[in-house]
Amino acid sequence: AYDGPSLILCYAHCISHGIDMACGIEEQKKAVNSGHWLLYRYNPALAAKGENPLIFDSKPPTISFEEYAYGENRYRVLKKTNPDAAGRLMTLAQQDVERRYQLYKYLSEIGGNGAKGVE
């Protein structure tokens, strides 16, 4: 709806992730369901109307980051080669997922006047 340039950022699975490429959409859903990949839109034109330009479409995570991550080679390899580091990093990643979700949720809920500082 914005009369200007648009940018779309997306998660793209690839064969090196070690997933069945026929199930790529399911892997993308897991990234969203874990909260690792947030869904949102930003429309600067809404700020001119006094509305919040950030529209947050993500629902609260329904699976852990670990459940998503260990479905892919890039995360499983670290768990196999250095399980202690993998465990610590997985804990930090889960905390990051939870903080980012809460931050984007908060930013999307502040009123139109407060949203002007977010532009």
Image (cartoon, grey):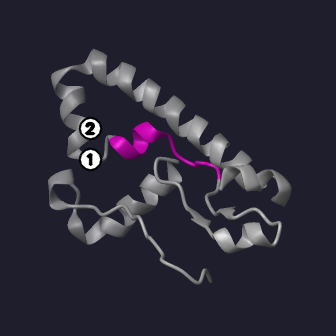
Pinpoint residue 34: horizontal percent, then vertical percent.
50, 48
Disc 2: CA contacts within 10 A as few (<14), some (14-19) or many (>=20): some
Q: Amino acid at mark 2?
A: Tyr
Q: Residue 75: which numbered mark, if any?
A: 2
As drawn, the residue found furthest toward the top would be 84
Q: Which residues are magenta?
A: 60-69
The residue sitting at 40% across, 46% down in the picture is 68
Magenta span contains residue 63: yes
Identity of the residue drawn at 35% across and 42% down: 69
Return the x and y of residue 84 as percentages of the image width and height: 29, 15
Amino acid type of the residue that numbered disc 1 sits on in the rendered structure? Glu
> Residue 54 — which label?
none
Residue for badge 1: 72
Q: Quarter holding the C terminus?
A: bottom right
Vertical side of 117 occupied by 91: above or below: above
Evaluate if marks 1 and 2 touch, with contact meaning CB atoms under 8 Å apart. yes
